[in-house]
Image (cartoon, rainbow, N blue to C red):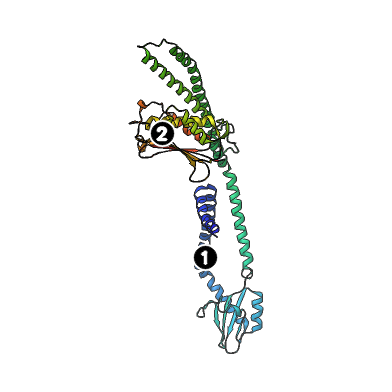
Amino acid sequence: MRGAKSGSRGRPGRWRHSLRHSLRVRLIVVFVVLALAMTAVFLGGMQRAFSTGWRDAARPLVADYMDRIVADLGTPPDVGRAKALVARLPISIRIEGPAVNWDSHPERGRHGFGPRNSDWFSRSTADGHRVSFGVGTLAWQREPRGIGWITLALLLALIVLAYAYVRRLLRPLDDIRAGAERFGRGSFDSPIPLRRRDELGDLAGRINTMAHDIHGMLDAKRALLLALSHELRSPLTRARLNAELLPVGQEGAPERAALLRDLAEMRDLISDLLESERLASPHAALHREPVDLAALLREMAAEHAEGARITLALEDGLPPLALDRSRIRLLVRNLLDNALRHGGEAAEPPRLSLGRAAEGTGIELELRDFGPGVGAAQIEHLTEPFYRTDGARQRATGGVGLGMYLCRLVAEAHGGTLAVRNAEPGLAVSVRLPGA
């Protein structure tokens, strides 16, 4: 019963949404309302015209006709003649008087007869009888249901034909919407089909041209970035090798260490750029395998140089997930580096927790530090590429602004989400991964 009630409550909402969202539905409603309004105006105008000018013009003719019918009935009125007139003409007759009292349609009562004080529909004879006239039973009155059903069927047929025509007329909009969704996902292989040569067909062609240009620009950008990254790797490797082969002296040790540190940062930047381009592609290839995420987190915390400072809160008995192990390691490593960099010196060490998601299926991983945190206005920008905050989290702490961006790409590539919030104190990063 609850499901039926909720379903009945949801139908008006779906209709309102369709009326606001669907151009077809709105056009059909406009057509129907316009047809009803035109019909009402036409009938009202005709009724007004007939009730004024026509009535005044027809009144003397009808009065003369009534006088002739009364004279034909005789005095006193002949019921036989009245029956013949009713059978031959679409009228009804009522005779009231001292000698004859007869009604052609007694079931109708006084409906259909004119007022008793009207000289239009009532006549008095010399012998004291009163003859009243009214409209008889017409064809549309004898079969009102049949005519009503036929009218309704014709109206529905017209609505169906109008909807079919509008649907065919607006069919390119469905193709344009589907094409825009494909282009938004990065799939430019299937252009929007050009079904007609009107304005909508011209719009579809222009969108195809725009998508082709965007595809070319994205390919050129990706090719340039990958080429530069690959070309920089070779001289960077040679520079690092030459720096490591420098003689280690007491005076040059700090300079050599600084040079190696800068070269390592450049190497990490190039690697992150290459990985971000791979993950940002809509066809990012993941090498999935069953992964015990809790065991992986313990392993990475033990391998990390400062992993002993991490507090682990890992739920036991979680099912293995189909994950790309190397990409998940990249995500966890970036989160650990970020938490230790900004919250390692806080009074409370960073905490890494893992458990089932509160809502729905899946597993949630959260890493929280107890450092200075960031401003509320900067939270939504933390996962953007090359975004760096000011204040406590500045360049002196290291990093180039790609770590959180890579974490978001890894989570989304696995069908999950990444969320950042101010934990007050500190920053909490939550990663939700779908279950098996």
Residue 240 falls in which quadrant of the image? top left
Residue lying at 44% horizontally and 20% vertically, measured from the top left: 264
Circles 1 and 2: CB atoms closer than 8 Å: no
Report the disc number at residue 382: 2
Name the foreground residue: 182 vs 237: 237
The residue at the far left in this view is 391
Q: Which residue is mark 1?
A: 47
CA–CA distance in space, label 1 to label 2 = 72 Å
Residue 171 position in % (x across, y down):
58, 43
Q: Amino acid at mark 2?
A: Leu
- How many dots with numbers? 2
Q: Earlier in the sequence, mark 1 or mark 2?
A: 1
Q: Secondary structure at mark 2?
A: loop
Q: Is residue 33 above or below residue 85?
A: above
Q: Which of the 4 image quadrants contains residue 109?
A: bottom right
For residue 238, side relative to residue 348 (left or right): right
Q: Residue at x 63, y 61 (%)?
A: 150
